Image (spheres, rainbow, N blue to C red):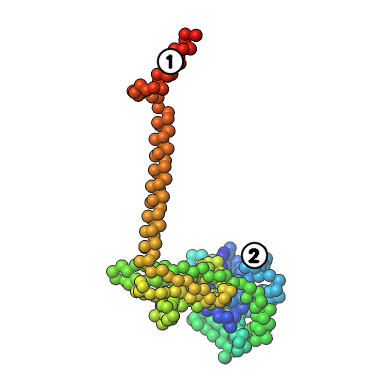
Amino acid sequence: MDILMPAFILFSSVSAEIHIFGWYKHIYRENQQAANQVISFIDDIPTGIYNSKTKIFKYINGFGSEGKLFVSESIQTSHCQICERLRYGDYDDLVRDTNMTYMNDDFFFLQFVKGCELDTESGKMSSFTYYALNGVHFMHVDLKTSQWQSSHPASQRIVQIWNKKFGIYNIISEKECQERLQKNLVWLYSKTATPKVRILYREPDGTDPARLMCHVTRFYPRDIDVIWYKGNISLVDEQIRGETLPNGDLTYQIGVVIEDPESTADYHCIVKHRSLKENEMRVDWGAPAATIKIVWIYVLILFLVLLLVAGIILYRIKSENQHSQPRVNRAWDAQDQQELDHMNVETTH
C-alpha cells in the first residue's frame, strides 16, 4: 500500500526562519494483519522511508549520512509502547467505535504524525503529535495541558485510558529539536531549484478583462516573492496571487495575475528566490500590439524566402527540360550547313 505525506506538511508554509522535522506513520490492515510504514521528513522534504513488511529503511531525495542519527532514532521512537498498543489493540476498538460498517476491514487505516517546529531567529520551539483515522483527525497532544485531547467521539475512551496510564509519552524536547535541525540545516539549504518564469497574456472575452500572468515554476524551496511592476510602481496591492502548488517532484509553481493591463505601459515581473544568484530575476512583458507587429514581420520575411526558393527550383526544372529535349522544327542555319558539308567531304574520301 502506497502512502502520502499529510496535507498539512506538504502544503504548509515553511519560511526561511521556521523549520520542522518529524516522521509520519501509516498503520493499516493487510491480510488481517497490522502493517505500517514510516516516512521521515525535514520541512516539506521526505528524507527516508521504512516498511514493516520488508523491515528495510532507505534514504530518499538525496538525504545521506548527515541525517542518519536523526532517521534511525525517529524510526525507533515511532515503535513506542503506545504505538504498539494502538497498532494491535486500540486499532480494533477505534474501528468498532466509529460505528462504520464495511465489507473489508482493510479499508481502515490510522495515521500518526509527530515532530517539532523551530523558529531559528527567536529560538521558539513547539512539538506536535496527531492521530487520524481514515484521514480524519481524531486525537492529539495538547502541550498546554500536557494531556491527550479527543476531537472525535470514537477516541474519547482511548484518550481517557492514555491520559490515565501513559500521559503524553515521548514528546520531542526543545533540546532534541534544536540538535536535529542544526545538524541537518546545511543539507537542507543545499536543496535549491532555480525558478523558470514566463509571462502569459489572455485577451478579454467579453465578460472577463484581459489578464497578464507571471507564471513561475520548477523552484525550491517553497518560499518565493513574485511582484508585478508598472514602470517603477509596485502593483503588489492590485495583483492577484494564486496558491503555491506542488509539481509532484519537490518543486513548486505559482501564478500572479494583473487584470486589464495597458498596452502602452511598461510592465515587468520581479521574482525573488533563495536559489537565484542575485536573489531576484526580472522578466519584461511586450505589449500585444508590438508582439503582433513583430510576428507579421517574421511571417513576411518567411514568405519572401519561400517565394525565392520556389522560383529557383522552377528555373532549374525548366532549364533541365530544355537541355534534355531534341531539336525539332528548328530553322535551318549556317551551323547546320557546315555540318552537312563536313559529312559530304568525309563521304567522298
Residue 37 in the image, given as x and y percentages of width and height: 61, 69
Quarter-of-image position of residue 266: bottom left
| Mark closer to the observer (2, 1) | 1
Helix, strand or loop status at disc 2: loop
Q: Mark 2 highlights which residue?
A: 53
Residue 297 in the image, given as x and y percentages of width and height: 38, 58
Q: Relative to the observer, which residue lies in front, 303 or 281?
A: 303
Q: Is residue 110 left or right of residue 51?
A: left
Q: Residues within 10 Å of mark 1 (few under 14, many from 20)?
A: few
Q: Residue furthest top?
A: 348
Task: Write the residue at 61% across / 72% down.
Answer: 191
Task: Write the residue at 52% across / 73% down.
Answer: 281
Q: Residues within 10 Å of mark 2 (few under 14, many from 20)?
A: few
Of callouts 2 and 1, the N-terminal one: 2
Q: Amino acid at mark 2?
A: Lys
Q: Quadrant of the N terminus?
A: bottom right
Q: Is residue 205 left or right of residue 68?
A: left
Task: Write the residue at 60% across / 87% down.
Answer: 121
Helix, strand or loop status at disc 1: helix
Residue 300 in view: yes
Residue 306 in the image, given as x and y percentages of width and height: 40, 48
Q: Mark 1 highlights which residue?
A: 341
Q: Amino acid at mark 1?
A: Asp
Q: Relative to the observer, which residue lies in front, 92 or 60?
A: 60
Task: Write the residue at 66% across / 66% down.
Answer: 58
Residue 241 in view: no
Residue 321, compared with residue 44, is above or below; it is above
Q: Residue furthest left?
A: 206
